[in-house]
Image (cartoon, rainbow, N blue to C red):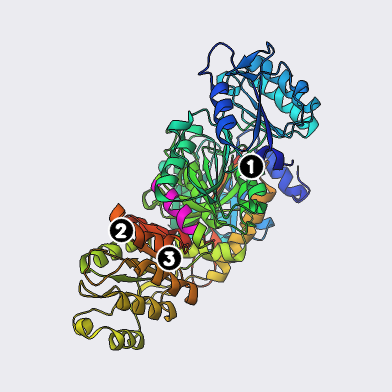
Amino acid sequence: MPAMLSGEMIEVLRASRLAGWVLEPEAKRLLSLRGLRVPRFQTATEEEDAVRRAREIGYPVVAKAVSPTIIHKSEYGAVVVGIAGDEEIRSVFHRLRKLPGFDRLLVEEMVSGLELIVGAKIDYQFGPVILLGMGGTGVEIYKDATLRMAPLKEADAASMIRGLKAHALLQGYRGAEPVNLPDLTRLLLAFSELAMDLQDEVESIDLNPVKCSADQCIVADARIMLA
Amino acid sequence: MDFTRLFEPRTMAVIGVSLANDRHPANVIYYKNHLRYPVTVYPVNPQGGDIQGERVYPHLREIPERVDLAVVAVRAEQVPGVIEECVAAGVGGAAVISGGFAESGRKDLQDRVVDIAREADFPFVGPNCLGLYSPDYVDTFFIPSERVVRPNPGGVAMVSQSGGVLVDQMVKFALEGVGMSLAVSIGNKALVRETDLLRYLMADSRTRVIALYVEGFAKNEGREFVQIASRSPKPVIVLKAGKSPGGAKAVSSHTASLGGDYRVFSEILAQFGVAEARNESELVSFCESLSCYPRSIEGRIGIVTGSGGHGAMAVDLCFGQGLQVPSLSESVQRQIREKLSPSIRSIASVENPVDLTGSAVDDDFVLAASLLSKAPEVDCIVMLLLPYLPGCTMDLGARLSQVYRKEGKPIVAYVPHVERYRMLIEGFELNHVPVAPSIDGAVLMAEAMKRCRPC
């Protein structure tokens, strides 16, 4: 394992070997160790625990099923947003626990913003490559993305942002506030360094969505596929 | 690895000439060079004897002088032994024409050849290739002399994984008057690869533009390639084959799905300022343009035309390429109009495109080109010239070239390519101003300068 990875990061990767990918809570932990912002979250395996965690974070919350067999959560209805109170989190817990491979419930704060995707793949010919695109569940419909070879320089990040068809949306379209572009640039650069350090361990990383608002860019979901 | 003796040989051995079959590729290569190139050529075959009265040497070591280049055209199994002999005889490098290696399941045999060569620091191109064409030195392509269409010596070097594409491209270069400094067919690229030749050509004084036909790179080799290319003082152009996605394999990652192999390739070339030619005609136009103007522009085009329709088509083509056609400032427009011939002053359009109409004379074209050369809103001028306009003379190409030489802003021209207008075209070519045979071609020449700008 490369020296640039901390002991805790190496442990996360090792523990995920069997599943072949890093589940969301661990992926977010790993990202936050490298300075990428993620929502406050907790995990729970019991109903009462889920209620307690939701209260700690403060309603409304998001709940997601954590399962090694569910890669695309939205296809299973495994993401519930805007949970307003105890009753609702209880019923969500009961529903999601029946999903295949259910391991834990992830409870996290609601974040808002324009949905982007930031990704990495280890390309055979070029090594680590970084992608920025319009994200969310429609990512494969918009297909609006730019790619650059890592490590990114600041100018690369700027040209990736400029290269999106939806570029105007990021800059504050029709009176909307522009997203925090310096923060997006910071995220892209930190992520590109991480992709360089993980190139022997991973096949691809999807941060989708990354929610970008005028305040910040925050990784709302993350999936790391191991090599 | 030193390529000098390989690419600029004074002496050459053709190993594997046939005594029985005079149409054997090795014989074709031998005769062609013996009869038509300055290189001194020695045919080699273990049986000795003679072909067309020339002595055939049974062995390399019997050749009376040191051999710079060995062309190897023996059976695959014999190639490792021949390369050992080349090394022992102090040969400068080899072109291994023979097939029957990795491409037909004999990677082991190929690896043996590579091991021998690497150990001895002995450069060879191939196997399974056509070798090289080095103007004024040598031509190892096994195409009979009378059928070869050979470009003039010039500034474009081309490296190709496919020999067929290379030969065909050379025909197109010759047709468009694009001169070449070197053409290398690298075939299986077992030892000498694109990255090695890129480094060599970046330093080669004959070469002004480096063009490559690439099917694919080895693991992480693309990374190395763009990193080297980004330091190139000369434009690097790549034509990539294999753009269609492979089998639709299910991908669990959106990044992998959006970032297909070709898309990654294409966007990374752009990132590092390597101009990707998307097809053969782009490759020819890019080579012609960049060998005249080895630098990048932002792509703000000023168009000068003698016909409104040509101007309108050029605008469409510019937009299609993502080139801008900015409007000209009031003062530039006023200056142009004030100095035009009285007969067209009231009918010409001095916006962009500048349409001088069919009544314009040489002076009007020269004036418009001069003023656009001084206008900061455009960084390249496309001249659409119709030699049949009564007011245009055959001197116009040379006169417009002088505008470029004085002002330094790139000018690309469209002139219909027929023999009758040859003198007009030559006026540009002699001054290294590129001329296209179509409006599309002229716009592509401008696009070339934008596409080698890192983004």
Instruction: Indicate the amino acid at tag 2.
Output: Tyr
Q: Quadrant of residue B3?
A: top right
Q: State the separation of the CA atoms marked 1 and 2.
A: 49 Å
**Labelled disc at residue B220:** 1
Q: What is the residue that sits farthest to the front in this orientation? A: B53
Q: State the separation of the CA atoms marked 3 and 2.
A: 47 Å
Residue A165 shows in this picture: no
Q: Which x, y percent locates residue A157?
A: 56, 63
Q: Chain of mark 3?
A: A
Residue A97 shows in this picture: yes
Instruction: Indicate the amino acid at tag 3.
Output: His
Total marks placed: 3
Q: Which residue is mark 2?
A: B421
Q: Which x, y percent locates residue B5?
A: 71, 39
Asked if residue B128 is among those painted magenta in the image, a careful observer would answer no
Instruction: Indicate the amino acid at tag 1.
Output: Asn
Most frequent secondary structure within the magenta stretch:
helix
Return the residue nearer the eye: A152 or B197.
B197
Query: Regarding mark 3 in the picture, which secondary structure is present there?
Result: helix
Instruction: Of the two numbered discs 1 and 2 on the same chain, state the one appearing first in sequence.
Output: 1
For the record, the magenta segment spans: B281-290
Quadrant of image for the N terminus of chain B:
top right
**Labelled disc at residue B351:** none
Q: Which residue is mark 3?
A: A167
Q: Which x, y percent locates residue A140?
A: 40, 47
Query: Regarding mark 2 in the picture, which secondary structure is present there?
Result: helix
Residue B237 placement, left or right of B378: right
